Image: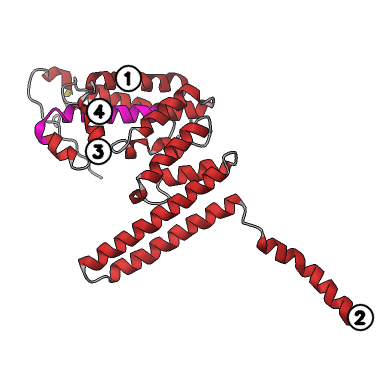
């Protein structure tokens, strides 16, 4: 009888462990496990790639890694869809877009992630990384720009407004450059090899000067209203000022900024003293 009671007690103590083992992992744990799976797969792929002896073997390995990345992206999307109110959903979608799966996972999964963010999470305060990736995907999709514009229209968070605006300014600035380049037949042919057809049409139909002006207006707004927001480098205000300076002075066709200094004979000079002449500037240092 005593043995029976001991066995029963042991069974009752062990029961919670069994029940816990049957319970699914918490959402955050699922995402972390998925991230770890990707990192492990990457390491194995890298090791195998180094050992591959032929181009065929390398192509097969490359294709296999792409399949794994796409499979992981779909699982991350599934997690986000199942938990539309859980913070892990935003993190999962952000992870897909911000390179957690590698840029070769870009495609249908990236497009869907942008759609879900615009639909359910445009007011989130956790979209810094997504905003920062807008210029990476703008050559293949119009959705980064749409998300940034939706954030500016709807996101209530001060920091997110600043981040969305400076990110959109960067995107428009590049779009302005592309709109000029596609006017050159040679440049158009080169760009067409790496840019989707609908994006190329968009560049052709865009007004470069108008895009540049909108970017400047956005940057001026960042300096005036969101300059205090911290960024990975300094503040959004400092970054916006640097971008404005470059756009206004360090572009072909713009008036060069004033430079003052001394020549090798100790004579003071200004760059504007040589206006109308060909000037070669040689910057150097000695430590």
| Residue marked by disc 3 | 196
Q: Quadrant of residue 22?
A: bottom right
Among the two numbered marks 1 and 3 on one chain, the one whose residue lies closer to the N terminus: 3
**Which residue is drawn at the image coordinates 59% and 50% (left, top)?**
27
Among the two numbered marks 2 and 3 on one chain, the one whose residue lies closer to the N terminus: 2
**Which residue is drawn at the image coordinates 41% and 43% (left, top)?**
97
222 vs 262, left or right, is right
Q: Quadrant of residue 66?
A: bottom left
Q: Secondary structure at mark 1?
A: helix
Magenta residues? Answer: 166-186
Q: Quadrant of residue 69?
A: bottom left
Find residue 54 and name its label.
none
162 vs 16, left or right, is left
Q: Secondary structure at mark 3?
A: loop
Among the two numbered marks 4 and 1 on one chain, the one whose residue lies closer to the N terminus: 4
Residue 237 visible somewhere in the drawing? no
Crowding at mark 2 (Cα within 10 Å: few <14, some 14-19, many 20+): few
Q: Are marks 2 and 3 in contact (CB under 8 Å)?
A: no
Among the two numbered marks 2 and 1 on one chain, the one whose residue lies closer to the N terminus: 2
Q: Quadrant of the N terminus?
A: bottom right
Residue 55 visible somewhere in the drawing? yes
| Residue marked by disc 1 | 214
Q: Secondary structure at mark 2?
A: helix
Among the two numbered marks 3 and 4 on one chain, the one whose residue lies closer to the N terminus: 3
Find residue 2 and name its label.
2
> Is residue 3 within the magenta segment?
no
Residue 52: x and y in percent read 27, 70
Q: Nearer the viewer, mark 2 or mark 1?
A: 2
| Residue marked by disc 4 | 202
């Amino acid at each position: 009888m005593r043995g029976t009671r001991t066995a029963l007690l042991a069974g009752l103590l062990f029961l919670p462990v069994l029940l816990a083992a049957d319970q699914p992992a918490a959402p955050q744990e699922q995402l972390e496990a998925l991230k770890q799976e990707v990192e492990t797969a990457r390491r194995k792929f890298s090791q195998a790639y180094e050992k591959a002896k032929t181009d065929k073997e390398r192509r097969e390995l490359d294709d296999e890694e792409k399949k794994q990345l796409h499979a992981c992206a779909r699982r991350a999307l599934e997690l986000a869809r199942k938990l539309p109110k859980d913070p892990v959903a935003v993190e999962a979608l952000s992870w897909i877009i911000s390179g957690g799966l590698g840029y070769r996972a870009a495609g249908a999964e990236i497009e869907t992630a942008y759609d879900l963010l615009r639909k359910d999470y445009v007011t989130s305060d956790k979209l810094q990384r997504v905003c920062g990736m807008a210029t990476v995907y703008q050559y293949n999709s119009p959705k980064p720009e749409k998300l940034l514009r939706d954030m500016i229209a709807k996101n209530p968070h001060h920091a997110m407004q600043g981040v969305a605006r400076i990110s959109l300014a960067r995107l428009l600035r590049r779009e302005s450059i592309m709109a000029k380049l596609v006017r050159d037949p040679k440049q158009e042919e080169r760009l067409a090899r790496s840019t989707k057809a609908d994006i190329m049409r968009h560049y052709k139909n865009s007004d470069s000067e108008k895009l540049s002006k909108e970017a400047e207006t956005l940057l001026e707004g960042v300096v005036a209203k969101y300059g205090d927001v911290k960024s990975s480098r300094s503040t959004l205000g400092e970054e916006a000022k640097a971008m404005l300076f470059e756009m206004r002075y360090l572009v072909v066709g713009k008036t060069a900024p004033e430079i003052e200094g001394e020549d090798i004979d100790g004579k003071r000079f200004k760059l504007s003293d040589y206006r109308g002449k060909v000037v070669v500037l040689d910057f150097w240092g000695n430590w």
